[in-house]
Amino acid sequence: MKGKTLVSLTTAAVLTAALAACSGGGKTATGTGDTNAPKGNKVYDIGFLNFAYTIFPDPNGKGVEAIKQKFGANIKAQFVLQSDYQEKLNVIMASGDMPDVVAIKDLDANYYKWAKQGAFLPLDDYIEKYATFKGVPKSIYDQFRVNGKIYSIPMYAPTYTFSGTIRQDWLDNLGLKMPTNYKELLDVAIAFTKNDPDKNGKNDTYGFALGQDVNPTPTMGAYWSGAWYHKDKDGNYMPGLIGPGRKESIETLATAYKEGAVTKDFAVLNWAQTNKEFYSGKAGIFIGTPSGMVEDYYTGLLKIDPKAKVVPIPFFKAPDGSQGNLKGRGFFGLTTLSAKLKNDPDKVKKILEILDYGRQFLPLDQRTPQNQQFDWIMGGNGVGYEMIAGKAVPKAGQESSTPIQYMLQRHEFWKPWAPSDDANQFSKASYNSPEMQAFIASIEQMEKTYNKNPYDDPVNLVYSETRASKGSELDKYLLGEQTKMISGQRPISDWDKMIEEWKSRGGAQLMKEVNDGIKAAKK
C-alpha cells in the first residue's frame, strides 16, 4: 500500500533552503564536518536517470543549484514515469550510452545481464569508506551480487512485511478471543459473518476482505508465506505458493467462502476496492504494516464507526515450532554507476559523497530546522517544509526545491539508511492522527514481541533464468487455480495435481535452478 508518510511528503520540499543553508551541514561519514564543500572551482557534471511515480522535479530546479553550491556537482537529471522506465532504460543500455548514475527499480534478468556485460562499475572497494554503505548488512548486498561483486548501492526499505489485522471491537462485542491458529481464525470469520459483530441489527458484515490474485491471503507467519520455506520429500526447497502452509490458508478461505465469510466477488476486485471492503466497515479481517499505510483509510473507517478499533493478530506458532514472519528484502531500488567512470576516480568519489550524504539517518527528534543537515536536505523551514505540531511537514509543490530529489537515489521518498526498523518510529514519523499512531504502534509492538527471528528467504540469494522469464506466468497459474479452489470451482483435493501441472509448465526447472543456486550460495 502506498501511504501518506512524512518522508514521502518531505522530499517534495527541500531544495530552496539549500541556498540558504549551503554553508552549514551535518557531519559526513567520517564525522569531520562539512567536508563535502567543493574544492577549488571544479564542478562535476553528473548525468542521472531515475524513475518516478507522481513527482517529476524540474531538471533545472533550485535543488540542483543547491547541490552545485554545496558539493561542486551539477546534477543533470532525467525522471521517467515508472511504468515507462524499463523500456526507456532498455533502449539507453542497448545504445551503450549509460548516464553516470542510473537507478534500477527491479532485480530482473536485465540487471544481471548488464552487470555481467560490464556496464556497471564494481563498488566493492568503496563500501567501507562511507558509513551508510558500510551499514548495509551483508545479507542485503548478497541479494544482488553478480559473480561475487557489488555493482550497486541499495536504497533503504524496512524489513517489515504484512501481518494480519482484525477488528478488536468486533471480537469484544461477540466475546471472542484473539485467534491463535487457523481453526480459531476461521471460527472468528464465520462469527463476524453471522453474529452481527457491529451490533447494528443488520446482516451486513463478514470475515475476510479479499481481492483478486487471492490478495491478501491470511498469512500468519513465515510458515504460511510465499517464501521458499518448506522442502519436498527429496529435501529441495519449494516456493511458498505450493507449500503446506499455503494449502492450509487456501483451505481456510475455501471453507470461509462457503459460509459467506469472504468477499463474494473477490476474484475481480482490485487492491483499492479490497481496501474499501475493510475500511468501509464490512469486513473484519485484513492486513497491516508499520510503513506505507494510507491514513485516510483508517480515519475514514473511524468516521463511519467511531468505536472501530483495528489491531494486529500475533503471528501464529507453526507446526514446526517456529513463530515469526517473513523478512522483507530490506531495500527498494538500486543506484548503479557507469563502468565508464573507472578512469575518473574523483568523479566517482563525488557521486558517492552526494549519495552518502542523502542517506544519512537522522532520528525523529533531530528532524527540525535546528539541524542544518536536515534543514538543507528538506529545502529549508518555510520553503520546502514547515513545522506543524512539532513535526516537519513538506510543502506541496516544492519538489524542485528539495535537494534530496536529485541526490542520486530513488526519490519521492526521503529514505535514509536506518540502523534498524525500530529506529524509524513510523508510528510517530509517518502518521498524524492519534488513532492511526496508536494502530501503527500496536503493529510495531507486536513485531517486537512475536517476530524476533524473521525468516530470510533463501531464494533472495539466487538468480534463476526460468524464474526471471517465467516466474510471473507460473505464479499467475497457481493463483488462478487457487482462486478456483476458494470459490468451489476446483476441489482442494486437487492440490497435488495442481503442483504437478505447475511443474510441467516450467516449475520443475525453476525449482532445480533455485535449489542449485541455494546450494552454491551456502558453500
Image (cartoon, rainbow, N blue to C red):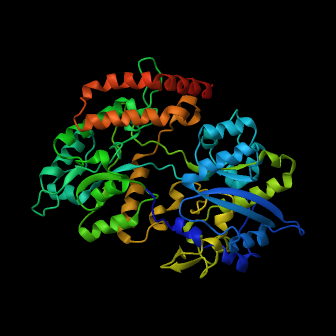
Query: What is the count of numbered marks?
Result: 0
Q: Is residue 19 above or below residue 240?
A: below
> Which of these two is toward me, 377 or 364?
377
Q: Locate residue 186 relative to residue 8 in the image: left or right.
A: left
Q: Quadrant of residue 325?
A: top left
Q: Residue at x 47, y 37 (%)?
A: 472
| Quadrant that contains the C terminus | top right
Q: Which residue is drawn at 16% across and 43% down?
A: 259
Residue 45 is situated, as x and y percent measured from the top left of the image, at 80, 62
Q: Which residue occupies the extreme bottom position in the image?
A: 382
Q: In this view, does 242 lie above or below 313?
A: above
Q: Residue at x 60, y 65 (%)?
A: 56
Q: In which quarter of the image is residue 125?
A: top right
> Which of these two is toward me, 4 or 387?
4
Q: In this view, does 520 lie above or below 458?
A: above
Q: Is residue 421 visible?
A: yes
Q: Can residue 318 be seen in this view?
A: no
Residue 330 is situated, as x and y percent measured from the top left of the image, at 55, 48
Q: In which quarter of the image is residue 243?
A: top left
Residue 507 is situated, as x and y percent measured from the top left of the image, at 46, 26
Q: Which residue is drawn at 31% across and 47% down?
A: 268
> Which of these two is toward me, 316 or 19?
19
Q: Which residue occupies the extreme right position in the image?
A: 40
Q: Which residue occupies the extreme top position in the image?
A: 234
